[in-house]
């Protein structure tokens, strides 16, 4: 039987005053019993996620990491606003129980939400989970269909249009991620100057203004229909809920698609890029990136100009995220061993993006 992604002992650098959280939380959920046991989920690379295990229920706490952070990152209030705004129109978000804006409680803002029961896939399938080609295909198609459905939410009706800054989203993204790259440089960073110049010169106009997740990949999706062994038809993979709304905003949906496809590494990708795989998108039956993009466009009805631009952008954006984390690791601001190879990952991503540009010219 497949099991949910497990949580372990909190890292010392991420620990917080559990009793203080419990006292504060009881003002919102007065029926909570004694102080909970706290465990830390290890899958995230940005905001921190903890399980609050009470005797009769599980809750989840989200808070930002300590140390130097990008100015626009780790906005707890934004995550809360997005999830509460989407809930009536797109039932894939966890219920937020309470949001603490008072940093005196644990030293930062945080919020507490419901714990969704289901399976979160990591690098490979967990022991006991059978996912043959037919079910893998359904899972891949469900992943892209759900992203398309998010992009079809009416942001005005959901009260979330104010998250956007109007036309020019593509331009702001290119300028912003280029600026973040320059702000996170280390002495071993590859030269991304030509890559940034190419993106700047070839940026298209926005195709629409839609609700974007910003980090759409399997380890942010809570899955159902992945039960015990049986025939291919015994269980149909489904998405129970979507996590990690830190980067959510309103903007061009094709940029969100490009970002998501940077994670969708398949079995036929070149070896060094394949080493960066962090989700089982390589399994037999999983759709290719080309099939995912075609299905998305059919479901949304959006126009597509040059897919190569969005593909290159997705790789560059992922390289910047990895470089920011690598810079924190190099500076000793995090000791998470999961980040020890991020410097090499940055080089692979920049090289792949540059190679795609060469193929185009």
Image (spheres, helix red, strand yellow):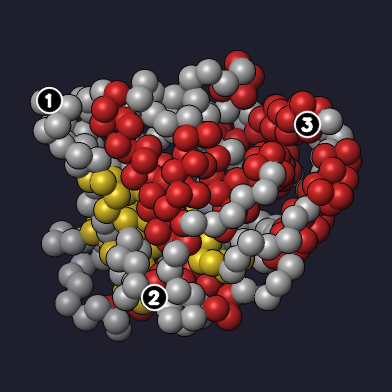
The residue that mark 2 highlights is 84
How many numbered dots are placed on residues in this image?
A: 3
Alpha carbon separation for disc pair 3 and 1: 44 Å
Point out the tag, 1 or 2, that comes first from the N-terminus.
2
* SS at mark 3 in the image: helix
The mark closer to the camera, 3 or 1, is 3
**Residue that appears at 84% across and 51% down:** 200
Q: Position of residue 24 (x, y in %)?
A: 36, 78
The residue that mark 1 highlights is 231
Quadrant in which the N terminus is drawn: top left
The numbered dot on residue 360 is 3
**Residue that appears at 44% across and 43% down:** 295
Q: Is residue 95 placed above or below 68 in the rendered structure?
A: below
Q: Position of residue 309 (x, y in %)?
A: 71, 44
Alpha carbon separation for disc pair 1 and 2: 38 Å
**Residue that appears at 31% across and 69% down:** 95
Q: Position of residue 308 (x, y in %)?
A: 69, 39
Judge from the rendering whether residue 70 lies leftward or rightward of residue 228; answer left or right: right
Q: Is residue 307 placed above or below 111 in the rendered structure?
A: above
How dense is the environment of label 2, judged by Cα within 10 Å: few (below 14), some, or many (20 and up)?
some
Question: Residue 230 lies in what quarter of the image?
Answer: top left
Alpha carbon separation for disc pair 2 and 3: 42 Å
The mark closer to the camera, 2 or 3, is 3
Judge from the rendering whether residue 131 lies leftward or rightward of residue 63; answer left or right: left
Q: Which residue is nearer to you in this view: 238 or 298?
A: 298
Q: Can you see residue 80?
A: no
Question: Residue 129 lies in what quarter of the image?
Answer: top left
Point out the tag, 3 or 1, that comes first from the N-terminus.
1
Judge from the rendering whether residue 26 lies leftward or rightward of residue 43; answer left or right: left
Q: Can you see residue 256?
A: yes
**Residue that appears at 29% across and 23% down:** 133
């Amino acid at each position: 039987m497949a099991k949910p992604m497990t949580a372990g002992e909190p890292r010392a650098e991420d620990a917080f005053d559990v009793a203080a959280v419990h006292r504060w939380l009881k003002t919102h959920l007065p029926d909570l019993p004694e102080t909970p046991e706290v465990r830390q989920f290890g899958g995230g690379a940005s905001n921190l996620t903890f399980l609050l295990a009470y005797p009769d229920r599980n809750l989840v706490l989200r808070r930002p990491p300590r140390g130097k952070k990008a100015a626009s990152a780790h906005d707890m209030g934004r995550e809360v606003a997005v999830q509460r705004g989407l809930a009536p129109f797109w039932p894939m978000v966890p219920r937020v129980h309470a949001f603490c804006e008072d940093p005196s409680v644990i030293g930062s803002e945080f919020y507490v939400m419901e714990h969704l029961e289901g399976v979160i896939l990591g690098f490979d399938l967990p022991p006991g989970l059978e996912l043959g080609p037919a079910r893998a295909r359904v899972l891949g198609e469900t992943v892209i269909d759900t992203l398309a459905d998010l992009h079809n939410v009416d942001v005005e009706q959901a009260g979330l249009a104010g998250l956007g800054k109007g036309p020019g989203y593509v331009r702001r993204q290119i300028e912003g991620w280029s600026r973040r790259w320059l702000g996170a440089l280390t002495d071993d960073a590859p030269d991304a100057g030509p890559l940034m110049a190419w993106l700047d010169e070839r940026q298209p106009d926005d195709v629409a203004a839609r609700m974007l997740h910003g980090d759409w990949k399997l380890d942010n999706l809570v899955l159902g229909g992945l039960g015990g062994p049986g025939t291919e038809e015994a269980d149909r993979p489904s998405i129970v809920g979507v996590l990690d709304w830190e980067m959510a905003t309103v903007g061009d949906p094709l940029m969100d698609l490009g970002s998501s496809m940077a994670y969708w590494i398949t079995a036929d990708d070149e070896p060094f890029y394949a080493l960066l795989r962090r989700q089982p998108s390589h399994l037999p039956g999983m759709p290719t990136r080309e099939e995912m993009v075609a299905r998305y466009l059919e479901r949304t009805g959006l126009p597509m100009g040059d897919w190569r631009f969005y593909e290159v952008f997705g790789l560059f954006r992922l390289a910047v995220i990895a470089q920011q984390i690598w810079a924190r690791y190099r500076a000793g601001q995090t000791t998470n061993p999961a980040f020890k190879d991020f410097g090499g990952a940055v080089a692979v991503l920049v090289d792949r993006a540059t190679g795609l540009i060469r193929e185009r010219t």
